Every structure is written in structure tokens, then in C-alpha cells.
Amino acid sequence: MGENEYESCAYVNFMDPTAKNALLKNYNAEEALSDIGIFTGVKIEPGKTLVILDEIQEASEGLSIMKAFAEDASDYHIVAAGSYLGI
């Protein structure tokens, strides 16, 4: 994955019910990044950490938080993937 290009990676799979219930609960990008860091045990730093959000369609606020990341956390490198997006 991103280990070759970044100092660290924070990977979240929203098929995991624990992740689905613990993260992305209708708040801002800063709070979401903090919670992702706590959940994964990875210190999330702009430009040094790749945040991977897998199966984002399973998180109720997943697409909304991606918009917040784009608008309010553009220094962070965040990737979202979903096997059912666009269907």
C-alpha cells in the first residue's frame, strides 16, 4: 500500500462494524481525523500519513466527510474506496 511513499498509513475498513459505529459521526474533518488516528493507533500528520478509508459506502456519513476533508483538510492525503460506489 502506501508504506513505500508515506511514513505511516492509517487504514480503516468500514465493513468492520466497530469502525462503522465509531467513526464519521456527522462532524468536521479535524474531529474525524483525530478519531481515525485514535481508532487506528496511527498519528496522522499532513503529508506524512496516508489515510485509507475502505468500503466508504458502509459509513453513513462517508461521502459527506470526504467533502469536508477536501474543503477543510486539503493538506492531508486521504483515499476512499468502495466496491459499490456508483451503483
Image: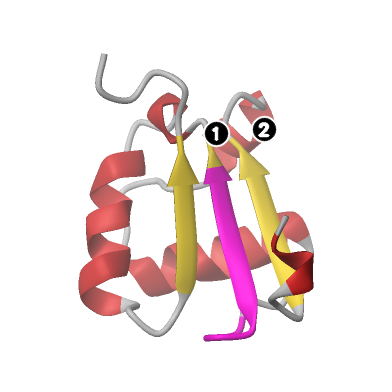
Q: Is residue 65 left or right of residue 47?
A: left
Say which mark, if any, is on residue 8.
Answer: none
Which quarter of the figure has residue 47?
A: bottom right
**Residue at coordinates 41% horizontally, 74% vertically from top-left?**
30
Which residue position is annotated with label 1?
A: 21
Identify which amino acid the numbered label 2 is placed on.
Thr
Q: Please rate how many residues cluster around mark 2, counting C-alpha atoms within 10 Å: few if below 14, some from 14 to 19, many from 20.
A: few
Q: Quadrant of the C terminus?
A: top left
x, y (%) of residue 65?
31, 53
x, y (%) of residue 23?
52, 47
Q: Is residue 20 above or below residue 75?
A: above
- Which span of residues is magenta-colored? 45-53
Asked whether 75 falls inside the magenta stretch, the response is no
x, y (%) of residue 3?
78, 67
> Circle 1 — which element?
helix
Identify which amino acid the numbered label 1 is placed on.
Asn
Q: Is residue 55 above or below residue 41?
A: above
Residue 42: in sight, yes or no? no
Residue 37: in sight, yes or no? yes
Pointers 2 and 1 in contact (C-beta within 8 Å): yes
Which quarter of the figure has residue 84?
A: top left
**Residue at coordinates 73% horizontally, 55% vertically from top-left?**
1
Task: Name the one closer to the observer, 67 or 19.
Answer: 67
